[in-house]
Amino acid sequence: RTVHPTSMTSSCKSLLPCRPRSGLLAGCVRRTLSSQGTRCRFSVKIRAETTSSESATTSSSQEDNSAVVSKNLEVMRKFSEQYAKRSGTYFCMDKSVTAVVIQGLAEHKDELGAPLCPCRHYDDKALEAEQGFWNCPCVPMRERKECHCMLFLTEDNDFAGDEQTITPEELDEFTEAMK
């Protein structure tokens, strides 16, 4: 299937056809680029399908995974604070952006063993994590201080806040809706 024009902005064109997914999460992933080659829209449509036996299995495995994700969340929080201080960058003035990105990094660290950038679409996440280009801090961040996720912002960025720390309580507060 292809992307319907109504799902794109007028300056965007489809980069990938809609690819149906199956299993527990069924849906469709679309990615678009503007005519200048920059990403302008990424949308995911997902439909959850579970049976009662899957729900029971899922809830017990979620309890096991929550301890690992919680540990990785703290690891990524500390890493983010240290890297911001070391690189002279700041977190976004909207701390919910910072929290969601750190949560995504922690989930990828759990799933892939590496903190793969959560703000990009990958055809093969495991391969991307292995190659390391988009592992946080990604190559563009290390080379040019360009963070696509808005986790590490330079002082001159309009969205940069004045903090280089985020508390575990702030992370919990802003990521509660994601759980």
Image (cartoon, rainbow, N blue to C red):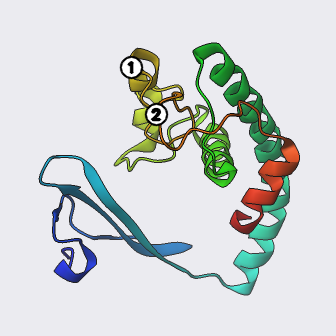
- Name the residue beneath numbered marker 2: 147
* Residue at screen point 40% across, 35% down: 127
Q: Which residue matches tag 1?
A: 144
Residue 22 appears in the picture as rendered: no
- Dot label at residue 27: none
Question: Position of 105 compared to 71: left or right?
Answer: left
- Label 1 crowd (10 A; few <14 / some 14-19 / many >=20): few
Q: Is residue 97 left or right of residue 157?
A: right
Quadrant where the image shows the C terminus: bottom right
For residue 48, what is the image quadrant?
Answer: bottom right
Horizontal and vertical percent position of residue 160: 56, 38
Where's residue 176, x and y in %? 78, 63
Answer above or below: position of 82 versus 120. Answer: above
Examine the image and state in which quarter residue 80 appears.
top right
Relative height, residue 39 to residue 71 (above, below): below
Task: For label 2, count other residues whose C-alpha is less than 10 Å away and answer few (under 14), some (14-19) or many (20+).
Answer: some
